[in-house]
Image (cartoon, helix red, strand yellow):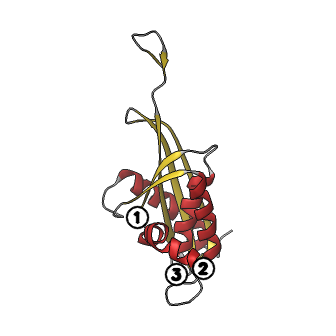
Amino acid sequence: MVFCQSGYLHMPELRLVAYTDGACSGNPGPGGWGVLLQALSDGKVVKERELSEGEKLTTNNKMELFAAITALETLEHTSEITIFTDSKYVMNGIQTWLPGWKENNWKTSSKKPVKNKELWKQLDELCQQHKVDWNWVKGHAGNVGNERVDELARSAMEPYKENDGP
């Protein structure tokens, strides 16, 4: 909080950011996803939350979608958020393919059923509730947020790789 010259209280505006990632060992195989949510004020992180989970048998694309869905589900009210992903699948799906899929009754341009349709529907519904700015980042290229969620996703996957997992 800052008092302005006028004497009125000024609350710095918070900017919400999420980094999302999925990982899979084999495709399908054991997998995990990771989310890093950050609230920033004047460019500084004022609140941070990490989320992750793994599965015994999944695909990388499902884990990428679960991460994005979880980032949006975690928001407590309608929000503006910037989501960073290294998944071309998520980026192309949300920005390019989704309108056509919906128009074509969830069929691809080659008339095949959309894979992960229920997850795409869930992500689409969540995107209607929030103002989402999607950004692609190159994976494993030194982006600190992306590297962190990669670590979270891989750590969440690890227990499922050993001795058939939980």
Amino acid type for the residue under numbered disc 1: Asp
Q: Mark 1 or mark 2, which is nearer to you?
A: 2
159 or 23: nearer the viewer: 23
Q: Is residue 52 visible?
A: no
Mark 2: few, some, or many residues within 10 Å (few <14, many ≥20)?
many
Q: Position of residue 54 (x, y in %)?
A: 60, 65
The answer to whether 96 appears left or right of 70 in the picture is left
Label 3, residues with CA under 10 Å away: few <14, some 14-19, many ≥20: few
Residue 159, position as x, y percentages in the image: 60, 66
Residue 66 drawn at (x, y percent): 58, 64
Q: Which residue is mark 2?
A: 106
Residue 73 percent coordinates (x, y): 63, 53
Provide the residue designation for mark 1: 86
User: Residue at 49% of width from left, 24% of height from top?
Assistant: 11
Q: Amino acid at mark 2?
A: Trp
Task: Answer whether labels 1 and 2 touch (C-beta < 8 Å).
Answer: no
Number of residues whose C-alpha sits closer than 10 Å to that of mark 1, classed few (under 14), some (14–19) or many (20 or more): many
Tell me which amino acid carries mark 3.
Asn
- Which of the two marks, 2 or 3, is nearer to us in this view? 2
Callout 3 touching callout 1 (CB < 8 Å): no
At 46% across and 9% down in the image, what residue appears? 7
Marks 2 & 3, CB-CB < 8 Å contact: no
Q: Secondary structure at mark 1?
A: loop
Closer to the N terminus: mark 3 or mark 1? 3
Q: Secondary structure at mark 3?
A: loop
Q: Which residue is mark 3?
A: 27
| Residues at marks 1 and 2, CA–CA distance in whole angstroms | 24 Å
Q: Residue furthest right?
A: 166
Q: Give the structural element (helix, strand or loop) at label 2.
A: loop
